[in-house]
Amino acid sequence: MCGIVGVRSERGVRLSRVVSVLQGLQHRGQEASGFVGITTDGREVGFKDVGLVSEVFRRYGADPLLKVAVAHTRYSTQGESYRPENVQPFVGFIGERLLALVHNGNLTNYPQLKAELQRDGVILRSTSDSEVILLLYARESGAPEERIRRLTSKVEGAWTVLMIDGDRLLAFRDPYGFRPLWMGREGDEVWFASEDSALRSAEIDVVEEVGIGEGYVVDGRVRKFGVGVKVPLPCSFELVYFARPDSNLFGRSVYEWRLRAGEVLAEVDSLEADVVVPVPDSGTIYAIGYARRSGIPFQMGLIRSHYVGRSFIQPSQDVRRRTVRAKLFPVPFVLKGRRVVLIDDSLVRGTTMREIVRMVRDAGAKEVHVRIGSPPVISPCYFGIDTPTREELAASRMDTARIGEFIEADSILYLPLSRFREALPNFCVSCFTGEYAVKVPSDVRV
Ligand code: SF4
């Protein structure tokens, strides 16, 4: 998962403004970030490095006036974590013409595409699938729309892309629409960002969600074009966990989705308890919905430090475990002697939740009942979210009762898969079902 931003303006936009939009997408990736742009006086500029958006751009230290720019905040899926050559944007040239690319998603036929390029003598400078999109674009001919349509027929999987080609800005989503993209405008500035909330919080007017299989070329004008729709498969996990709750994605309010899922969870539950406690921030809106429907009072029994990163997107298991203790603090006043309903959005490995259950019990809770606002994750994602291998997924090797024991909870309940699927008929739910509508080659499967 990554956050991407692009802008084009004849009058120019300060880099600091691009950074403020990118910071609104920090939750989508915390490993590295960067930008490439062309200034209003024609200079090519760029910088990328590991670290949070604010750290990386402080290191850069300048604030050029940009005619066109793309920027990225990284969370690794394809390619290894923290390899500097995998940090985006990727840059290339057609003659003297600058190409720069940022990508959110994951190509399922990357090994095959890479082998084909290498057979043709192309030297790859990274282990990232995003570079392959740039190379394929550069090898095509014709107008940007034509190049994009032709590369679309070659790549499989998930790709939402922003590109610079000369001084044009290009934006396009794959024919399945796995990853989101929004368009905004402010004066003569044309903006694209992964989530509308990032545009709104930078006071940019939101125009529309870029459709599945749709693209834009922005030069002096704005032209929309189609790359075709195969099967609509926007990622349901964006609604469940990844997106900001104040975002709208795939025609839905993320907040509303989580609130309703919490209510449904309460509807299918018959638990008697004293207090509903979210795992903040990911479980908070689910817990509000659960409390509202069950009538059990909602309390913040865990306080989150906002100075420590999200545990799910930290690259190693050990870092993740220590991060949990460093970022969540139990409130004995709420928990002591109580029967607690502990709510989170999802349960992936189970190790984080076990740590939290222990913490809640240590704070004096009499019972700890875990409720999860999505179905069991039983299968890896190959479309841009770094879920672990099948063996590491709690629900792929244990039934629900055994997971309850593993996380040391008094009981556990998930949102039923049938209700989830019913509410999201045209979404990807592969990690919850193990059925992949898009072919995943055996050499990619984990
Ligand atoms: S497999 Fe899961 S995480 Fe991956 S795109 Fe589909 S719903 Fe999203």
Image (cartoon, rainbow, N blue to C red):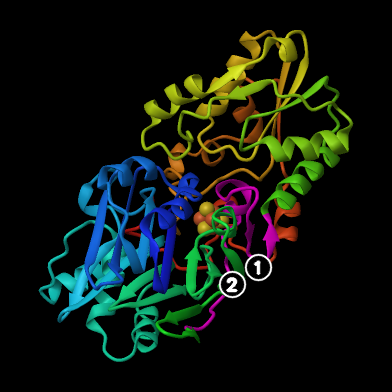
Q: Is residue 364 above or below residue 388?
A: above
Q: Quadrant of residue 296?
A: top right
Q: Position of residue 195 (x, y in %)?
A: 55, 58
Q: Is residue 252 magenta?
A: yes
Q: Earlier in the sequence, mark 2 or mark 1?
A: 2
Describe residue 111's horizontal placement relative to residue 182 as left or right. left
Q: Quadrant of residue 410?
A: top right
For image coordinates 62% across by 31% down, the residue present is 280
Say if mark 2 contacts mark 1, CB within 8 Å.
Answer: yes
Q: Is residue 66 magenta?
A: no
Highlighted magenta segment, given as a residue range: 227-253
Task: Using the numbered discs, state the Cα–Cα distance from disc 2 to disc 1 in whole angstroms.
Answer: 6 Å
Describe residue 188's horizontal placement relative to residue 13 as left or right. right
For image coordinates 62% across by 16% down, the residue present is 330
Q: Is mark 1 within 8 Å of ligand 1?
A: no
Q: Is residue 206 above or below residue 359?
A: below
Q: Secondary structure at mark 2?
A: loop
Decide if residue 86 is in sight here: yes
Label at residue 232: 2
* Residue under label 1: 426
Three-letter amino acid code at disc 2?
A: Pro
Q: Is residue 162 above or below residue 106?
A: below
Q: Quadrant of residue 382?
A: bottom left
Toward the viewer: 185 or 363? 185
Toward the viewer: 198 or 205? 205
